[in-house]
Amino acid sequence: MERADVVLVYPQRAPAQGRHWIMPSLGLMYLSAALRRAGYSVRHIDHTFLERRDVLAEIERLRPSVIGIYCMITMQDEALSLAEQVRAKALTVVGGPYPSGEPDTFVDQFDLVAVGEGEETIVQVMQHLDDRRFEEIPGLVFRRDGEIVRTTPRVRSKDMSHLPLPYRGDIPNAEYIDYWRKHWKDATTPLMSTRGCPFRCDFCHKSVFGDLFSARPVESVVAEMREIAELGYDHIWMSDDLFTLNYKRTFELAQAIEKEHLPLTWE
């Protein structure tokens, strides 16, 4: 029987009515790629077009050792209710923007709360799965013997060249493409070419998450765009915090994209 070391769940739900910008989780795609590169078997379950019973059945079938759940503030109820249903089955980890900003909200509902970038964190959780020495892993918050443990902060890397391309093989791409073409014109999916922003505006979350700016190599971004085109998408939404910060790099990337003659538009 097929099983997975890790199951990653994106608890987004497609709206029953109206049209909305719904997209898959880049964060979980990056975690999936990092885990695969480290030699672990991974299944990324996108809840968007599934019923909860289907998600639970797939988790039951795969029998993972770890279940990772992504959470934004709009997904809190779904994430918490799912955690309650699966916590007895595996070690549960929650990450994403909301848990990173408010880890104490989740510390009693999950075994581990991941704060900040998660590619290294999730791999190290797997490496310490047997000895449970999670206090040695930066970027975690959890409860032990009734006390909340906060490990050293996860230091963000300025070098993004070490990151694998996000793994899109588990994404329901056909469903996303159909949804977008039904409600909009072009099937759109996200891509992130940089992370962070050096400014600290009072109204922005960067006052919480820090001001380190890092950029992927141009060749890596273009390679990901090729993959997206091969999957059948029409349009890419650059989800960078500040895409045009580096003027020279922005033009280099635009010129590299133009040379590829990909059947894609982007913004």
Image (cartoon, rainbow, N blue to C red):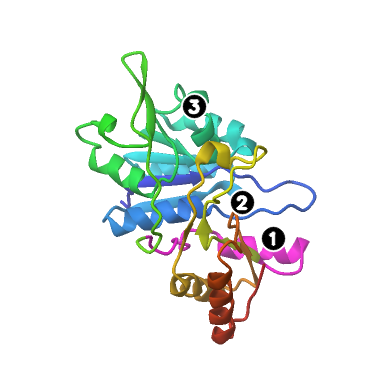
In which quarter of the view is residue 12 placed? top right
Q: Residues within 10 Å of mark 3 (few under 14, many from 20)?
A: many
Q: Establish if 143 lies above or below 137.
A: above
* Residue farthest toward the left in the current orientation of the protein: 131
Residue picked out by circle 2 = 49
Q: Establish if 44 lies above or below 79.
A: below
Could you tell me which secondary element the residue under label 2 belongs to?
helix
Disc 1 residue type (three-letter): Tyr
Q: Position of residue 253 (x, y in %)?
A: 54, 74
User: What is the spatial separation of the Cα atoms under label 2 and label 1, in whole angstroms?
Assistant: 10 Å
Residue picked out by circle 3 = 106
Mark closest to the chain's N terminus, 3 or 2 = 2
Could you tell me which secondary element the residue under label 3 belongs to?
loop
Judge whether residue 196 is colored magenta. no
- Looking at the rendering, the stretch of residues picked out in magenta corresponds to 163-187
Q: Residue at x 29, y 52 (%)?
A: 40
Residue 71 visible in the current orientation: no
Mark closest to the chain's N terminus, 3 or 1 = 3
User: What is the spatial separation of the Cα atoms under label 3 and label 2, in whole angstroms?
Assistant: 25 Å
Q: Residue at x 59, y 65 (%)?
A: 174
- The quarter of the image holding the C terminus is bottom right
In which quarter of the view is residue 23 placed? bottom right
Q: In the image shown, does 51 or 13 lie closer to the viewer?
A: 13
In which quarter of the view is residue 178 placed? bottom right
Residue picked out by circle 1 = 179
Q: Residue at x 77, y 64 (%)?
A: 184
Mark closest to the chain's N terminus, 2 or 1 = 2
Q: In the image shown, does 102 or 24 lie closer to the viewer?
A: 102
Q: Are marks 2 and 1 in contact (CB under 8 Å)?
A: yes
Q: Residue at x 51, y 76 (%)?
A: 226
